[in-house]
Amino acid sequence: MTGTVPPSSYEMTPRRQALPRGTRLWRTHKAKRRPGQFNPVSVDPHFGGNRFDGTSYDPYPYLYVADDAATALAETLLRSLEFDVGTGMRLIPYAAVKDKSLSLLRTRCELTLVSLTTEADLAAVCQDSWLLEAEGERYAKTRRWASEIRVQAPDTAGLIWQSRRNRPRLALVLFGDRCAEDALAEERGGGIPDLGSPAGVTEANRLLAPLRAAIVPPWPGENPLGGGGGHC
């Protein structure tokens, strides 16, 4: 589907999925932001931003998470990244992880989400895989679709779908205006507080290795193809 028909033209039947209390979720985020802090910035409806961000037309805080650590990294770091011909790897520039963290969160209450994980789920919101595959400038249309899903499923706190960068693992966006302030709690001792540190790069590369992806650090002695040098 090209997304040329306005989403408000359709009467949808969004399918709900309960996210149980105590569910572990992973998030890649700026280190200066608290692990469970929603992004308050509403983006321009037409330019910039991500797939299901809040916009000035529908301003809601949002927070992207995944059901495992590798998926949280992949969803952030592997966007539109080609495989390198010489190495057969996706080589991630160090700037992508500098001043970033990987955090482990746990839900403190049950959350009701709109499921987009199957073709039947997508059909229920009058969509197909386009909604999850579109990138770049087409995010303007996927954000409009998210806003209409919110209108037609006012009891839901977010969306859940199969990660396009680590199928069949799951990615989620939570709506800050529909989640309790304390809906997410940080799990101490989990995650990678400093993804840009030597130890952080080594651990992230271990998680990304099955996806043939690696962060290339600026210091000598680190082999992104082999997982470590003198700084492990």
Image (tube, rainbow, N blue to C red):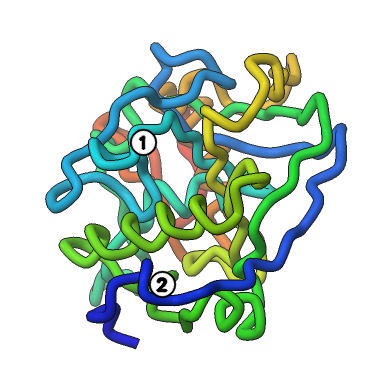
Q: Are marks 2 and 1 in contact (CB under 8 Å)?
A: no
> With respect to residue 210, does 121 lie above or below?
below
The residue at the point 52 percent across, 26 percent down is 199
- Let me know if residue 184 appears in the view: yes
Residue drawn at 43 percent across, 22 percent down: 197
Please state, as top left, top right, bottom left or bottom right, where the N terminus lies in the image: bottom left
Number of marks present in the image shown? 2
Q: From the viewer's perspective, is 137 left or right of 158? A: left
What secondary structure is found at the residue carrying circle 2?
A: helix
Q: Residues within 10 Å of mark 2 (few under 14, many from 20)?
A: many
Identified at 39% across, 12% down, the residue is: 32
Left or right: where does residue 85 sit relative to residue 100?
left
Image coordinates of residue 59 in percent, x first then y, are 34, 33
From what the image shows, is residue 62 above or below residue 49?
above
Q: Quadrant location of the C terminus?
A: top right
Q: Which mark is residue 221?
A: 1
**Label of residue 96 in the image:** none
Between circles 2 and 1, the one closer to the viewer is 2
Gap between marks 2 and 1 measured at Cα: 42 Å
- To which residue does mark 2 refer? 131
**Sooner in the amino-acid sequence: mark 2 or mark 1:** 2
Secondary structure of the residue carrying numbered label 1:
loop
For badge 1, the amino acid type reads Gly
